[in-house]
Structure formats: C-alpha cells, structure tokens
Image: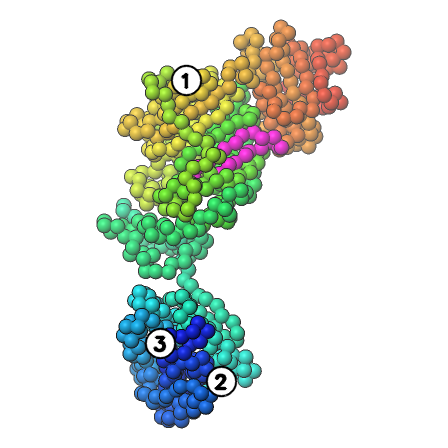
Amino acid sequence: MWSSGAIALEKVGHRAPAESSNLTVVFVSTGLGREYALAFAERGASVVVNDLGGNAKGGGKSSAAADKVVEEIRAKGGKAVANYEAAEISALILRDRSFARTSDLDWDLIHRIHLRGSFLVTRAAWDHMKKQKFGRIIMTTSAAGIYGNFGQSNYSAAKLGLLGLANTLAIEGSKHNIYCNTIAPVAGSRLTETVMPPDLVASLKPEYVAPLVLWLCHEQCQENGGLFEVGAGWVGKLRWERSQGQIMRQKSRPMTPEAVRDQWDKICDFTDATKPTTIQGHVLSRVDAGGQVEAPPSAAAAAAASGINPALAVGQKLPVSTFNFNHTQCILYALGVGMSTKDPDHLRFLYEGHPDFSCLPTFGVIPSQAAMMDGGLASIPGLNIDFTQVLHGEQYLEFYRPLPTSGTLTSEATIADVLDKGSGAVILLDVNTYSGGELICYNQFSVFVVGAGRFGGTRTSAKAKAPLPPPKRAPDAVVTDCTTRDQAALYRLSGDWNPLHIDPGFAAMGGFKAPILHGLCSFGFAARHVLKQFANNDPSRFKAIKVRFAKPVMPGQSLQTAMWKEGSRIHIECKVKETSDVVLSGAYVDLHQAAESASVSAQGGRLQSDLVFTEIGRRISEVGPELVKKVNAVFGWEITKEGKTAAQWTIDLKNGAGSLQKGPYGGKVDVTFTVADEDFMEVVQGKLNPQKAFFSGKLKVRGNIMLSQKLEVILKDYAKL
C-alpha cells in the first residue's frame, strides 16, 4: 500500500466484521502510510512496510524508515515485515516546476513513482484477489489531480491518471468481489510541512484520514468506484455532473463554430443536470446507425426517470401568471386560427366596433398557457425532466362564463397527477383562470415527456379528462378549411414562441422537413367549425372542448373537421385533407342548449342600444384603467323590447383594466338597470332625464342606487355619446 499511490489489500482467511485480521497490506513507512500500517496492524492485519528511504526529490536510499515502523508494530504484538524496493514503488516525492521548466526527467520520474508504481503493486496483488474472490484497492489521488495546481503539471497528470485507473479496476474487479475506490487526502507530511504553517499541519493529522481507508477496505463496505476528499476529520464524496447539452448536428446543415457559439449558454447550463456514472451515458452511445446523434437511449432514459417522483410533484403549484389583453389580442388570435373578413359571420370576432364583438372561446388557452411556458415546471420538485423531450399530448378547456374582450386575467396552475406510460411520463397540469376573483375557465394540459417513464407510477388517473371516440356512423357535418403558408407565423404572435413553428433549422433538428403548425392552432380551427355549424357562432353557447393531438399539420395544408352531434355533445375528428392523416382524435365539444344562450333577442333584430354599448366598449379599451379608478363598480344592463328582455350587458369598471361583456355576468354586479331600448337611447341623447325616467318607472334600478350617479361619467364624459 502506498499513501500516495495504491493500497492493495488481500484477504487470506476469515475475519470478524469488526476486525481486519488475516489480511496482507502494503504501506509506505511515513506520513499517511505509517498511520495506515499502524491502524491495520492494530486490527490484526499482516503488514508489509515498503520504503526505499529516499528524500522528497527521489534521491538517496535507506532502510531505517521501514525498519522503524516494523519494529513499532511488532512491539505492539502485530505482524509486519519490511521491504526496500526501487523508487517506482516508493511514492513520497515531488518535482514541482512550472510547465515551461519541467524536464523529461521531472515528468517521467513523477509518473513512474505515482502512476506506474501503483500499477505495479496492484497488478502483483490482482490474481491473488481474483482467486480468493476478495480484494480491496485504494488509489490515492490529490486535489492537484482533481483541480490542477500551478507548478505541478507532472504531479497533477499522474494523480488524475490514478483516478482513471481506479475507475476501470472498479469495473473489471466487481464480478470478483474486488472493489476499488480513490481518496484525495489532505494531511500533514514531509511534503506539506515545508509549504504549510505548523498550526495548519497539526490540524491535518494522518490519523484523521485512516478511518476512511479502513472502512473502504472492510468486507462489509460495498462502495466501489467512489472518489472521496478527506482531511481534518471531514469526508466528502465527489461525482461527475453534466449539463443537458445541445445537439449541434443537423441533417440539413453542417456543424459550425458559430452554431456552437450561439448555443454556448445552453451547452454550459447545468439546470436539470445529469450525473453520469458509466461510459454507457457517453455521447457515442447516442449515435444511430446512420451516424446521427439521437436522444438518450432507453438506459439513459431510465436513469433520467429516477428524477420523476409523483409523491413530491402532485399538488405542487406553479407561480401565478398574469395576462393583460384588449381587443387587439382577441382579433389577432381569431386571425391566427383562420378567421377572415371574407366570411361575414367572422366579423364579430375581427372588428371591435361590431355590436356583438366577442372573443373566440378557444382563446382561453392563451392566458393559461403562459403559466406553463414561463418555465414554472422547472421549479417543481420531483420533475427532473429533459425539456427538449416535452410534447403536448392532449388539451381540455371548460368555461364558467364567456371570455371578456379585454382586462387582466390571472392563472393558477397545479400538478394534478403524474402518470407512468412506460415509454414516457405524462404530466397533468390543471390551470384555473380568473378575472378578478371570478373563475372564468379551466384548462388541463396533458404533457408527454419522452423517455421519462418506468419510474413505478400508475398508468391512468381519475383526474384526467379522457378523450372519447366518435360514433360509428357517417358524420352529421364536414367542414374543410385551408390553412395558409403563414398560418404558424401568424398564430405564434398569440404567445407560443416555440421556434419549431417558424425556424426551418430548428424544425429539421426535430425531424421535420419544414416548421409545423401549432397543435393548438388546429384546435382553434376545429372549435370554430363546431361553433359555426352547431351554435350559430355564439360563443356563450360554448361550454367545453377536449382533443388529443395525433399528428402534425404543415402550414398550407387543408384541415377537414368531421362532426357528429349527440345531444349537446359534438364529437369531432380532424384530418389533413391532402394526406388523410388524423391530427385531432378522441375530440369533442360540449355546447349549452340554445335556451341557455346569453344572447337573447325577442325580436331577432338589432337593437339601437347595441351601437351605444359597442362604443362604450371601445372607450373602455382605451381608458379603462382611468375609468376603474374613478368609478370602481360593476354595472349590469337589461335592455327590453316590447316588455321582454332583449339583451344583457355588463360594464365592469372594478376589476383590472375594465371590460364590457354582452350576456349574463357570473360575478357580483353592484347595480343593475332595466330599461327599454328606445328609452335608453333617449337617456343617452339627453332627451330623457335619468331621474325622471326612474320616478316614472321607465328606468328600474336594483342594488346600490347611489352608484347611478356615476352613469354620466360612463355615458358622456368618456363615451362621448
């Protein structure tokens, strides 16, 4: 055994668990080696004490050092013999020089002593260990080998070489019950006493290192291939860590230094780092038959799966996200999912001045998606996943009231469940979106993580919104709609900035010939097909939608939506017309019955008051926050025609930036006005005094009547009506 090289320990007979009897060990006679020799001998080992007796530079020769330790052991009743072999198995030397001044002799001598010497003594013991099915080897590296040190290029290289040797011996010896570990001790010795102050050397006694060595040599210790720093009574284990890295080769482009430069931050990002322990995790194991670098194979995926812990993740909440919007975002989204002024029915979703201006229901995924895309998943314990392997699997969206066309929405996301699908993990993310304190809609994102399965979790969950197959009959309606070449470029402006949908090079890395359309864009196309075909484009009738994303769509392809009506549920299946590939499967839309619609029109015609409320909505979109400060109230309006309710409006100047909504309001209304359409116009035009209208019964008020004094602010000062 060498304190700066190798300890080779053979078991030549049975020994009790608490002792090291009937063992043969080899030691250097000074410093750490001496301490090891005394400690093992005290526990009954047979010790060979080796020391050439040279100086710190490797010169000279003497038997005195080894003889002295042997005598000390024997005096205590132990077994020991001395050995005076050549310098290659005597390790306590240094030849420190700056690299430019390091000679061939400096280099070769240090490597012979520290690296070759350890190799020789270990090889001498190896066959004996194999035959008896037991062996323990300790290689001694140093901080200079692990971290480098000025003036010690020869010593550092030799010491790190010992670590490589130890790692291989740990692999080759494991089947023979031969374990090999490496220590990097910090201890006072004849090499350190010349460069360290005496009080520091005193705190680094060799006796603070020996207990670790004795344990690593014990037959009950199953540690193999470990690297430990030890000194001054402290022991710590080191291990390798690797960033997720970036695949830089692309089938369609050469790998360039500029590409490496541009991805450098990601290459060096240790977020979600892995901790490789075998060569099987090396990059060569990721090269397929065609020479391309692919995702980690199943062995690496299984290792990554150990980072999935449902017990830690389920129930965890992501940071709350806030989404501010106005009519611009609503219109941009409608254009992104294929609406056009060529269809007059689309104008209510494209023109803020339309009397029935509304937000498409599927816009509800946009504010909720922000909660997930801001990186919140990375903060969840128990979800140590590779985000380059994340796919959008399914989506469910349900409404509790129609979306406003402007305002501030907040979304709260929770990990509902984590499922083990074998080939990957499924994360169910529930997102509730609120306007003020009122729940507007609920989303469930089903996220599939490729290669993250086999962690021992369940395959199904009662919390998952399940997809449903369509009826086995001909569809009741089929609608075909063309996407444009720029559909993905337009849709991404609503907030999904994934370069997969715009960058040809990035798409090629994912195996696509060109950027693909967002799955949620196809989702929006199919939803509005149902809305037009079965709900007369009335968003208040839209209750819920569920889809499974089956295959991608290329911008410019035609989407064909088949629909089956089963009561209030419309089953849908969406295909690419040109290829017949199903892109949305197991999908359905739930509708409210027509009687539940928020748009009620007794006469079926347009009301004069619609124009007024449209203008109020436009002004709120411009100066809503200022109105909220001045008014701070929610007003409800019931407009009648010939004694029957013809329309309902809500002016919310209490929450966020303010909003106007046509239809019933799910939250608390501070004051509600009921007035005939023609009388409302008289009040607005100044022809009818509101107080006279109230006392004459033409204007009815429920709630906080004092808030009616603020009507003039709304109807005149800001609306300029």
The reply to whether callout 1 and callout 2 are in contact (CB within 8 Å) is no
| 431 in the magenta segment | yes
Residue 389 locus on image (x, y percent): 38, 45
- The residue carrying mark 1 is 565
Q: Nearer the viewer, mark 1 or mark 2?
A: 1
**Helix, strand or loop for disc 2:** loop
Q: Report the disc number at residue 13.
A: 3
Circle 1 residues within 10 Å: few <14, some 14–19, many ≥20: some
- The answer to which of marks 3 and 2 sits earlier in the sequence is 3
Can you tell which quarter of the image residue 245 is in?
bottom left
User: What residue span does the magenta drawing correspond to?
Assistant: 429-447
Q: Residue at x 54, y 34 (%)?
A: 432
Q: Is residue 4 left or right of residue 325?
A: left
Residue 150 locus on image (x, y percent): 43, 76
- Quarter of the image where the C terminus is located: top right
- The answer to which of marks 1 and 2 sits earlier in the sequence is 2
Q: Residue at x 41, y 89 (%)?
A: 70
- The residue carrying mark 2 is 193
**Helix, strand or loop for disc 1:** strand
- The answer to which of marks 1 and 3 sits earlier in the sequence is 3
Q: Amino acid at mark 3?
A: Gly
Q: Determine the main secondary structure of the stretch shown in magenta.
A: strand
